[in-house]
């Protein structure tokens, strides 16, 4: 009797654009695909299924998507069995135009129904026609879906989705919907499950993360959640992104300062230092309130590193308004800033405002802002030269590590440090030498500062961790096995340890 050979599993590739929420959504998408029997395509091969998880915040998002789709068109024409799916914010926004502009796309799905992807792919294959499914509201909270975590040692944990703000430049509320909060018990159960799998750092995610609790009427829910994270045994580091200054309260500052595993790093979007522009943006705070928050954070945590977002060239911005932004930057002394040239987005109130700024003026202001931000960040980093810092070893953050014979890690304040590995000793066995693994903790002395990173070329002490063990286990997984796929939310208790194991604002 002749044996029947099974068909090889179809391969997939997920391409992600945008904020941390999109990155986390892509972990759900990969988990869903692998649960459905797909396997990740090798780096040098063409995947059978290509999924674009898109962003709609920047103006060039559309051009980037359609440019990438056009590159796949001849490949798809040569291999009709290949499938292309487009999801995320741009899919939610352009649901009616994606298949018109790119008729070879098989599936279009929105931000509220990522769990439908495997079914839509199969339906498109069987029916031989494009499937478009866009839900207007959240049906299943994404954290209940299967997940393939990218990291063995660090994880995103979504505590809310959507946003109740009405910032005139932002299209996210229209695409992600009103804020929906998870129950604290569900969040903590997911964190405990992650720690049981070897994760030692979590980043709490929300479009407006510190507004958490608005749906169930507890104004201090976020600070309570931070304190509860401090009680999770084995959880070494807690971060969150991104808060909104209007709702950033003193109880959150106190919880950060008093909870040892909540890290002294804060990303606080400024957007503009001009009160007039902030009003036009419908940002419900002014520069004095923003600087007051920074002052209170630093009083409670002097070592805190604070980063921000700034938009240059918002409609009607004058040189005086821009100078007000530079003044706030000088006073706040950010450790870093994500700076953006204003991008008109159809469907937002700002797109129809008078006083659109010429590209030349925007470019000039943007350059001056970048120069100031980098100057201050460099000065702040120089203050750390000679200090001892504790790093969690990171994977893939040092592009030149192979050439410089260094590894990279993040400090408690989230600064990036490249450190030498030729004189590393173990904390508990000083006579032995052991190369640190991603997820391990090293202690180093800073020897050099640059605007965007630090260097430590002296001796380093390593503490081997369960997260490093989880990373080791993941490297040893058999070919074709993806131990990173787990249920997003356990239903009862904490699962047994597995072999393996950060907005839009």
Image: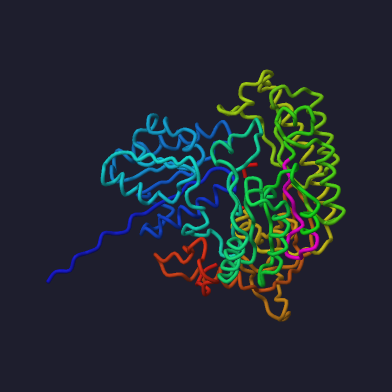
User: Magenta segment, principal secondary structure?
Assistant: loop
Give the magenta range.
Answer: 257-269
Q: Quadrant of residue 130?
A: top left
Q: Which of the two residues, 6 or 122, is positioned nearer the viewer here? A: 122
Q: Is residue 161 left or right of residue 319?
A: left
Which residue is at the front of the view, 4 or 328? 328
Q: Percent position (x, y) of residue 134?
A: 43, 40
Q: Work out which residue is located at the far front of the displayed protein and give it.
A: 217
Q: Residue furthest left?
A: 1
Q: Residue at x 76, y 64 (%)?
A: 259
Residue 208 or 219: which is nearer the viewer? 219
Asked if residue 368 is positioned above or below residue 26 in the image, the reply reads above
Query: Which quadrant is the C terminus positioned in?
Result: top right
Residue drawn at x 43%, y 46% as measured from the top left: 51
Q: In x, y percent, where is residue 227? A: 73, 63
| Residue 493 drawn in magenta | no
Identified at 61% across, 24% down, the residue is: 351
At 79% from the left and 55% from the top, the residue drawn is: 251
Left or right of 151 on screen, residue 326: right
| Above/below status of 380 relative to 90 | below
- Which quadrant: the N terminus? bottom left
- List x then y, in percent, for residue 174: 56, 36
Q: How is the image coloured?
A: rainbow
């Amino acid at each position: 009797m002749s044996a029947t050979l099974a068909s090889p599993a179809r391969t997939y590739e997920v391409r992600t654009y945008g904020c941390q929420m999109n990155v986390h959504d892509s972990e759900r998408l990969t988990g869903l695909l692998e649960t459905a029997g797909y396997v990740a395509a090798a780096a040098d091969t063409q995947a059978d299924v290509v999924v674009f998880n898109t962003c709609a915040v920047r103006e060039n998002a559309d051009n980037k998507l359609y440019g990438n789709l056009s590159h796949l068109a001849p490949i798809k024409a040569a291999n009709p069995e290949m499938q292309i799916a487009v999801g995320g914010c741009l899919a939610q926004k352009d649901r009616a135009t994606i298949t018109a502009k790119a008729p070879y796309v098989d599936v279009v799905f929105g931000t509220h129904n990522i769990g439908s992807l495997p079914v839509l792919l199969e339906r498109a294959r069987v029916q031989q026609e494009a499937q478009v499914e866009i839900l207007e509201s959240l049906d299943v909270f994404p954290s209940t879906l299967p997940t393939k975590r990218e990291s063995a040692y660090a994880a995103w944990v979504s505590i809310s989705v959507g946003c109740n703000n009405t910032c005139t430049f932002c299209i996210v509320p229209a695409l992600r919907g009103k804020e929906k909060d998870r129950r604290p018990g569900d969040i903590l159960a997911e964190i405990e499950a992650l720690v049981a799998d070897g994760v030692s750092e979590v980043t709490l995610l929300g479009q407006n993360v510190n507004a958490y609790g608005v749906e169930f009427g507890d104004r201090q829910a976020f600070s309570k959640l931070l304190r509860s994270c401090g009680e999770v045994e084995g959880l070494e580091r807690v971060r969150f992104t991104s808060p909104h200054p209007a709702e950033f309260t003193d109880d959150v500052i106190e919880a950060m300062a008093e909870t040892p595993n909540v890290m002294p790093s804060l990303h606080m979007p400024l957007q503009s230092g001009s009160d007039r522009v902030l009003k036009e943006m419908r940002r419900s705070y002014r520069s004095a309130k923003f600087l007051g928050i920074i002052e209170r954070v630093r009083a409670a945590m002097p070592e805190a590193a604070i980063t921000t977002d700034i938009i240059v060239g918002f409609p009607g911005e004058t040189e005086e308004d821009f100078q007000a932004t530079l003044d706030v930057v000088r006073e706040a002394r950010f450790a870093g800033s994500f700076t953006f040239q204003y991008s008109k987005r159809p469907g937002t109130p700002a797109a129809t405002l008078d006083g659109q700024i010429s590209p030349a003026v925007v470019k000039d202001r943007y350059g001056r802002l970048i120069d100031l931000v980098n100057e201050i960040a460099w000065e702040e980093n120089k203050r750390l030269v000679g200090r001892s810092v504790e790093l969690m070893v990171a994977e893939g953050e040092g592009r030149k590590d192979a050439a410089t014979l260094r590894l990279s890690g993040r400090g408690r304040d989230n600064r990036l440090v490249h450190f030498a590995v030729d004189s590393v000793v173990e904390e508990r066995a000083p006579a032995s030498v052991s190369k640190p693994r991603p997820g391990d903790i090293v202690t180093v002395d800073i020897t050099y500062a640059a605007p965007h990173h630090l260097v430590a070329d002296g001796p380093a002490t390593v503490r081997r961790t369960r997260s490093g063990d989880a990373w080791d286990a993941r490297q040893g997984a058999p070919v074709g096995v993806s131990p990173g796929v787990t249920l997003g939310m356990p239903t009862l208790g904490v699962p047994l340890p597995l072999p393996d194991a950060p907005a839009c604002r």
